[in-house]
Image (cartoon, rainbow, N blue to C red):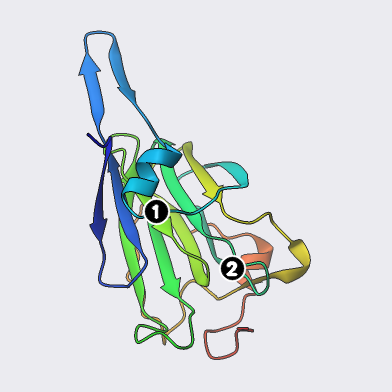
Amino acid sequence: MNSFTVSKTPIEGLIVIEPKVYNDTRGFFMESYNKESFAKLGLNMQFVQDNHIKSRIGVLRGIHYQRKFSQGRLVRVIKGKVYDVAVDLRKESPTFGKWYGIELSAENKKMFYIPENFGHAFLTLEDDSEVLCKTTNVYHPEFEAGIIYNDADLEIVWPQIDGDIVLSEKDKNLPTFKNAELD
């Protein structure tokens, strides 16, 4: 028996992974990753880096990607809640420029796998939310790139939050989708 179920999304390669959670009076237990179980589901990615991100409510990080040494990402939330978005940047894909978003939370325990050659962003929906992200390649700052989160051509529908969206200076100055550097 596998400890995970996989759901496909409308964009090829993007998947939602739900772990089997064992609850009792002590709390819960779940596997968040098991190489053998993932392989049985056809998920043969190799992870090489783990990132842990904490953000206050309203922080929007992204849309980020690497032009070279692209990273696949397995994203999950261990505290709080975020709206997680992936944008297809594969020029040969029939869904090039399309996006998919999902709410990830400590409560629902869902994980979102975003393969290589996708842009990634998330909006924090609860204060002090913590996100864990496993990647298939190490971070190379010299190849970092991005797209502005509110690009009119992408038409991403972000959830409403109380207050303003908080962006880093870098993310405030990202180019539009049409002007983005895509390899």
Residue toward you, 135 or 79: 135
Residue 140: image quadrant is bottom right
x%, y% of residue 78? 42, 34
What residue is shown at x 44% (from left), y 61% (from top)? 114
From the viewer's perspective, tell me whether residue 47 is left or right of residue 57. Answer: right
Secondary structure under tag 2 reads: strand
Disc 1 versus disc 2: nearer the observer: 1
Neighbourhood count class around disc 2 (C-alpha, 10 Å): few under 14, some 14–19, many 20 upward: many
Residue 11: image quadrant is bottom left
Task: Compare marks 1 and 2 and give the one earlier in the sequence.
Answer: 1
Residue annotated with mark 2: 65
Q: Please indicate, yes or no, whether residue 164 appears anywhere in the rendered image.
A: no
Vertical order, 112 against 100 (above or below)? above
Separation of marks 1 and 2 at Cα, in angstroms = 21 Å
Residue annotated with mark 1: 43
x%, y% of residue 80? 38, 37
Q: Amino acid at mark 1?
A: Leu
- The reply to whether discs 1 and 2 touch (Cβ–Cβ < 8 Å) is no
Q: Amino acid at mark 2?
A: Tyr
Q: Which quarter of the image is occupied by the C terminus?
A: bottom right
What residue is shown at x 33% (from left), y 63% (from top)? 101
What residue is shown at x 37% (from left), y 53% (from top)? 112
Vertical order, 24 against 31 (above or below)? above
Residue toward you, 177 or 5: 5
Residue toward you, 23 or 12: 12
Residue 2: image quadrant is top left
Residue toward you, 88 or 58: 88
